[in-house]
Image (cartoon, rainbow, N blue to C red):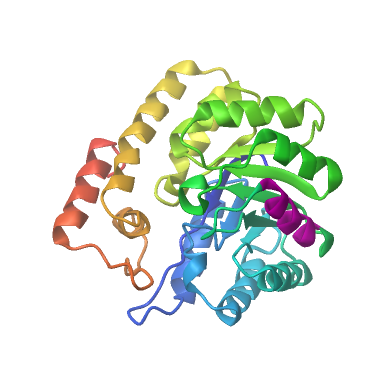
Amino acid sequence: MFKGIISPVITILDQEGHIDYTGMGEHIENLIDHGLQGLLFFGSMGEFFAFTQEEKKEFIEFAVEKVNHRIPVLIGTGGTCVEEVVELTQFSEKKGAEAAVVVSPYYFKLDDESIYNYYATVAQCTKLPILIYNFPDRTNVNLSPELVLRLARDYPNIKGIKDTVDNISHTRMLIETVKSEIKDFHVLSGFDEYLVPNLMAGGDGVLCGLTNVAPEIFIELYRAYEGKNFGTVVAKQRQINELMRIYNVSNPFIAAIKVAVMLTGRKMIPMVKAPAAILDDQGMNKVKNILVKANVL
């Protein structure tokens, strides 16, 4: 179920910072039309950290209805308040989402037992498949393969992990440790450029932000890899390598990604939630130049 190319969808906003439902509908249709294998709403790229529970619930209803089970809908429900995580996970299940993606708690550096208890609480509250979200650059904790195996062993609805670690060795060790015992556990890389290394290590694909910008490149690369068309694999990988520079244009990177999406054809304002700021003209030109060099524009 969680294989191939899955997009952590940006949340398109209007000038006041409210969700632009018309723009979101168009973006969702575009991603589905390109053949992606799933859509994640309210991941890091979707600025989950900047929306209220009520805003999230309203949008979850919209997204599930819009996608209408054409491809899996995943909802990012993680956070620092366990009660809110449970509430949003149960709400997502009730509304028809196919999975919850749950980031580990952030701010304090928690030990393994605290993290285990967090995921255990969430897993027990729902029948939804759960994907653990490991993002140590944001949470200050890198989940070990042994901890992930323990969770997957104890809670059968913990079905996979998004491993956003800039070290393919960690992802490889997750694959080797967990999949050796639980064959249907899904390991997705969170870094765009690690699709091929992930697949070569026995993983299942990527859940990465540049799919908002150029979904066709990732789909073509995935199909070329499966078809052993390695000339195309090399060509598409080079395009992705160039596009990775977009992440360095702004901090947080969401502002630059939104500009890239706008430049590639979406009718939208590249607005981001405060306190982040929209890119200035110089930043927009940097993104445009990267897109041109990557042969996306």
Q: Main secondary structure of the magenta part?
A: helix
Q: Answer whether residue 297 is magenta in the image.
A: no
**Side of 86 where 31 appears, left or right:** left
- In this picture, is 148 found above or below 229? below
285 vs 181, left or right, is left
Above or below, 291 relative to 74:
above
Q: Is residue 99 left or right of residue 58?
A: right
Mark yes or no: residue 1 visible.
no
Q: Quadrant of residue 185?
A: top right
The residue under the point 33% across, 40% down is 243
Residue placed most toward the observer, 124 or 19: 124
Please tell me which residue is depicted at 67% across the width and 53% down the height of the picture.
71
Q: Is residue 263 above or below residue 289?
A: below
In which quadrant is the N terminus drawn?
A: top right
Q: How many marks?
A: 0
183 lies left or right of 7: right
The front one of 126 and 235 is 126
In front of the other: 248 or 61 = 248
Residue 12 screen position, x and y as percent: 42, 68
Q: Quadrant of residue 43?
A: bottom right
Q: Is residue 121 magenta?
A: yes
x%, y% of residue 53? 60, 78
Could you say which is closer to the camera, residue 70 or residue 285?
Answer: 285
Residue 110 place in picture, x, y as percent: 61, 53
- What stretch of residues is rendered in magenta? 112-123
**Quadrant of image for the C terminus:** top left
Measured as percent of width and height from the top left, residue 295 is found at 28, 37
Residue 19 visible in the displayed image: yes
For image coordinates 72% across by 50% down, the residue present is 113
Seen in the picture, residue 155 relative to 85 is either above or below; the reply is: above
What's the residue at 68%, 46% (across, down)? 112
